[in-house]
Image (cartoon, rainbow, N blue to C red):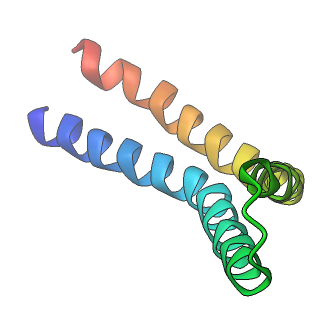
Amino acid sequence: MESELVKLGIETFKLSLYLGLPTLLAGMIIGLMVSIFQATTQINETTLSFIPKIIGVILILILTMPWMLNMTIQFSERIFNYIPEFIK
């Protein structure tokens, strides 16, 4: 019983990493590209990095939403199937 809960916790952390990683990577890569652009052109506008990051993250969310939704639904189904085992 306790080992099942530990496995479930580990699976929950893995799922959160899988779901968050694409958007975080997109924001990091776009931020790095904007920083390099700002350094080479010596444009020091603080708001310049926000708009490309927001657009990039939204695009990644739109592109990966079916995959994210599928993973979340599968995880939820497994959780609901575990409920009778935990009640015993």
Q: Position of residue 40 (x, y in %)?
A: 73, 87
Q: Residue at image x 77%, y 56%?
A: 45
> Is residue 43 positioned above or below 4 on the image?
below
Q: Nearer the viewer, residue 79 or 56?
A: 56
Q: Position of residue 17 (x, y in %)?
A: 47, 54
> Is residue 87 positioned above or below 53 on the image?
above
Q: Position of residue 78 (x, y in %)?
A: 50, 38
Quarter of the C terminus within the rendering: top left
How many labels were placed on the picture? 0
Query: Is residue 79 rendered to the left or right of residue 56?
Result: left
| Res 56 → quadrant | bottom right
> Is residue 28 positioned above or below 12 on the image?
below
| Res 22 → quadrant | bottom right
| Residue closest to the far top | 87
Q: Nearer the viewer, residue 35 or 21?
A: 35
Quarter of the N terminus within the rendering: top left
| Residue closest to the far bottom | 40
> Is residue 21 positioned above or below 71 on the image?
below
Q: Nearer the viewer, residue 37 or 6?
A: 37
Query: Is residue 82 rendered to the left or right of residue 22?
Result: left
Q: Residue at image x 80%, y 82%?
A: 41
Q: Position of residue 60 (x, y in %)?
A: 81, 59
Query: Is residue 47 rendered to the left or right of residue 12?
Result: right
Query: Is residue 11 rendered to the left or right of residue 39?
Result: left
Q: Residue at image x 74%, y 77%?
A: 42
